[in-house]
Image (spheres, rainbow, N blue to C red):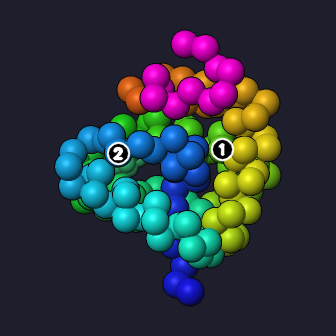
Amino acid sequence: MDEFLLRAHHGLCLCFFQGKGYSGEFVKNMTEKKMALERNPPVRLTDQTDEICRACPNNRSGQCLSDEKAARYDREVLARCGLTPGEVLPYRELEARVLETILIPGHREEICGDCQWTALCRWKGETP
Ligand code: SF4
């Protein structure tokens, strides 16, 4: 199975994605990518633009317009999950680490609480 290039913080976004996003093209691409990840391909972690950013209107020639935030979220997810950019692991393993180290203990907002989509991403028991 081909490797899937994935920004580390998209491991969080994917847990909550419910068909909303920056544009119709973005939503279509993210829906397709989420389905592809359900087949548990190897993911190569990055702190730069990835397969999901590919259809995002904020992606300007491979650079995110919100890269200060996006890269900060990536660094936090990587550090908390004990991972590094360039590392390859099965998607399900990334998902499990994100759940165990960030979502279930209630740490998500410490990482991406200033994201414009944060209200959509409430983990069980998290209150606004
Ligand atoms: S906002 Fe930035 S990090 Fe998020 S999908 Fe778009 S280009 Fe990628």
Residue 19, horizontal then vertical, whole percent: 35, 45
Q: Amino acid at mark 1?
A: Val
Question: Residue 96 magenta-drawn?
Answer: no
Q: Which mark, residue 116? A: none
Q: Residue at x 46, y 34 (%)?
A: 69
Left or right of residue 2: residue 125: right
Q: Is residue 55 above or below residue 78?
A: below
- Judging by the rendered image, the residue that carries numbered circle 2 is 19
Q: CA distance from mark 2 to mark 1?
A: 23 Å
Q: Main secondary structure of the magenta part?
A: loop
Q: Residues within 10 Å of mark 1 (few under 14, many from 20)?
A: many
Nearer-N-terminus badge (2/1): 2
Q: Residue at x 75, y 51 (%)?
A: 97
Quadrant of the frame with the C terminus: top right
Residue 34, horizontal then vertical, whole percent: 46, 60
- Label 1 sits on a secondary structure element that is helix
Task: Indicate which label's residue lies in the foreground, 2 or 1.
Answer: 2
- Judging by the rendered image, the residue that carries numbered circle 1 is 77
Q: Tell me where the magenta segment starts and ends, as one range.
A: 118-128
Quadrant of the frame with the N terminus: bottom right
In the rendered structure, are the residues bearing label 2 and label 1 in contact, judged by CB atoms less than 8 Å apart? no
Q: Is residue 96 above or below residue 124?
A: below
Q: Amino acid at mark 2?
A: Gly
Q: Nearer the viewer, residue 102 or 19?
A: 19
- Label 2 sits on a secondary structure element that is loop
Q: Residue at x 68, y 21 (%)?
A: 125
Most extreme residue toward the top is 128
